[in-house]
Amino acid sequence: ALPISAENEPTAGMLSNYPFQSLGFTPERQRDFIALDLGPALASSSHANVKLLILDDQRLLLPYWAKVVLSDIRAARYIHGIAVHWYLDALIPPDITLDATHNIYPDYFLINTEIGRA
C-alpha cells in the first residue's frame, strides 16, 4: 500500500498573507480531522489499505506534533507513519526531533518527504 499524508505543510495555511491558498492545521485540528473525517472515510472506501501519514512539515515540530495527534486513539488507529521535511539542521539537529519521536512512537515509521541543503 502506498502512503499519503493528511496534508503537505499544514502550518503554512496558518500564516497570514501566505502567497498561495493552503489549508491550515494545528496538530489538534489535524488530529480531529483524521479522527472524525479522513480516517473513517479512508477506512470505509476502496482505499482502506492506504498508509496515512501525519505532519508532512518541518521536523522541528516533532515530537510535539506527534504527541498531540497520536495520543488520541481515535486518530492514531488510522495513522501508520510521520512524514517530515528535512531542513533547518542548523536550528535543530535531527537527533532532537527524529530520535526523540522514534523513541516515543517506535511503531510508526518516519519518512522524509522533502529535503534541502542544510
Image (spheres, rainbow, N blue to C red):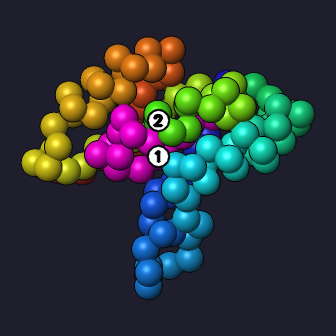
- Quadrant the N terminus occupies: top right
- Disc 2 target residue: 66
Q: Can residue 110 be seen in this view?
A: yes
53 horizontally vs 12: left or right: right
Q: Where is residue 63 in the image (x, y as percent from the top left)?
A: 36, 35
- Examine the image and state in which quarter residue 42 appears: top right
Left of 36 or right of it: where is 107?
Answer: left
Find residue 88 and name its label.
none
Does residue 38 show up magenta in the picture? Answer: no
Please count the marks in the image. Answer: 2
Find residue 88 and report its horizontal and vertical position in percent. Answer: 19, 50
Q: Looking at the image, can residue 50 be seen?
A: no
Mark 2 and mark 1 lie on one chain; the one further toward the N terminus is 1
The residue range painted magenta reads: 51-65
Amino acid under disc 2: Ala
Residue 55 placement (x, y as % from top left): 48, 44
Residue at the image position 45 percent from the left and 66 percent from the top: 12
Residue carrying label 1: 56
Mark 1 residue crowding within 10 angstroms, few (<14) / some (14–19) / many (20+): many
Whether 54 is among the magenta residues is yes
The local secondary structure at tag 2 comes to helix
The crowding category of the residue bearing disc 2, from other C-alpha atoms within 10 Å (few below 14, some 14 to 19, many at least 20), is many
Residue at 55% of width from left, 31% of height from top? 70
Q: Disc 2 or disc 1, which is closer to the eye?
A: 2
- Residue at 24% in and 49% down: 87
Could you give the CA–CA distance between mark 2 and mark 1, rounded to whole angstroms?
11 Å
In this view, the residue farthest toward the bottom is 17
Q: In this view, does 60 lie above or below 50?
A: below
At label 1, the amino acid type is: Asp
Q: Which element type, helix, strand or loop, lies under badge 1?
A: strand
Q: Camera-side residue: 47 or 9? A: 9
Tell whether 24 sits left or right of 43.
left
